[in-house]
Amino acid sequence: MTCAHPFRFAATMPAPIRPVAEWGAALRRFEDLGLWSVVAADHFTGGYTFEPMVALTAAAGATTTLRLQTGVLGNDYRHPVLVHRMASLLDVVSDGRVVLGLGAGWMTTDYEAAGIPLDPPGVRVSRFAEAVAVVKGLFGPGPFDFGGEYYEVHALDGLPKPVQQPHPPVFVGGGSPRVLRLAGREADIVGINASLRAGELGGDAVRDLSFARVAEKITWARDGAAAAGRDPDALELEINHWLAKVTPSAAAATDLLERMGTRFEADPAVLAASPSVLVGTVAQIVDTLGARREELGISYLQLDAGFPTPDLDAFAPVIEILAGT
């Protein structure tokens, strides 16, 4: 297929450090590399050390062009009225650089540590669908009403109004048919993820991101868009790379894929073809990303969303060649 969306690259926000000036310099280095956005996750456990909205607000003051993305806010942790209020103000103070990533919540350890009830997936997704409607409704021009099973809003005017109109880009990621169809109906950017019903990342998640499975997941999102009367091709498709590495040679890439295949009990050839794996020389990676955009429509790429943490500087030639094209 032919995709009109330009390539955009994202990276995970580094944890704020002291002195704060060094952290700001690290974020400006992302801008120098040509990254489009920095992404802040919303977890309490698993080594995550900062609250995303506060961190992104600080990042707004340290940068000038970098988009500020939540990746993604856990709906069960935050009321949608407050999600809207924080996101809209951040869009104002950042001069229109917010990308609002929203999700239903999934990491079991977060729920356990915070004492939040972990409802069945169907309940969480139903509640999330209402939350998306509330957040988007509050971005509207005037007072908003909503009456649902989980949320009620009465003549609330969502203030302040965001710089980006009608609202900041809404990002919804998921791995199940229901969430991805919801994303196709409601989101501007759709993140294609592994199924996370187990509440943790592991070998099953790795295997759920084969080329065939990702293609199927994209179909679910496009079906959701079409059913809502939206143009499926208007969806911007994003994927996180759990394995990303620029290698000095094709042989080194093959060796890495074989070792990771052994670790995760996966065929190295299946790993190499997975849209969530990006391993090879600069030339190989440029060709691979071009082919994946042509075949799947994926154009928005988070380079360091997994293990091991890649050397982002090594990706500078890839970003220079592809970003914005």
Image (cartoon, helix red, strand yellow):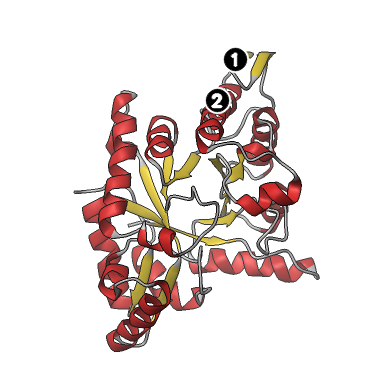
The residue lying toward the viewer, choosing from 58 and 243, is 243
Element marked by disc 1: strand
Please name the amino acid that badge 1 sits on. Answer: Phe
Across and down, in percent, residue 157 comes to: 67, 18
Residue 92 visible somewhere in the drawing? no
Image quarter of residue 153: top right
Determine the residue positioned at 61% across, 44% down: 73
Across and down, in percent, residue 142 comes to: 61, 15
Task: Give the residue pinned by disc 2.
Answer: 130
Q: Dot 2, crowdedness within 10 Å: few (<14), some or many (≥20)?
A: some
The residue lying toward the viewer, choosing from 73 and 57, is 73
Identify the disc placed on residue 22: none
Image quarter of residue 161: top right
Q: Dot 1, crowdedness within 10 Å: few (<14), some or many (≥20)?
A: some
Task: Give the residue pinned by disc 1.
Answer: 146
- Relative to 325, 34 lies left or right: right
Residue 309 visible somewhere in the drawing? yes
Task: Identify whether 49 is placed above or below 172.
Answer: below
Q: Are marks 1 and 2 in contact (CB under 8 Å)?
A: yes
Q: Which one is earlier in the sequence, the residue at label 1 or at label 2? A: 2
Please name the amino acid that badge 2 sits on. Answer: Glu
Across and down, in percent, residue 301 comes to: 42, 58
Determine the residue positioned at 34% across, 68% down: 321
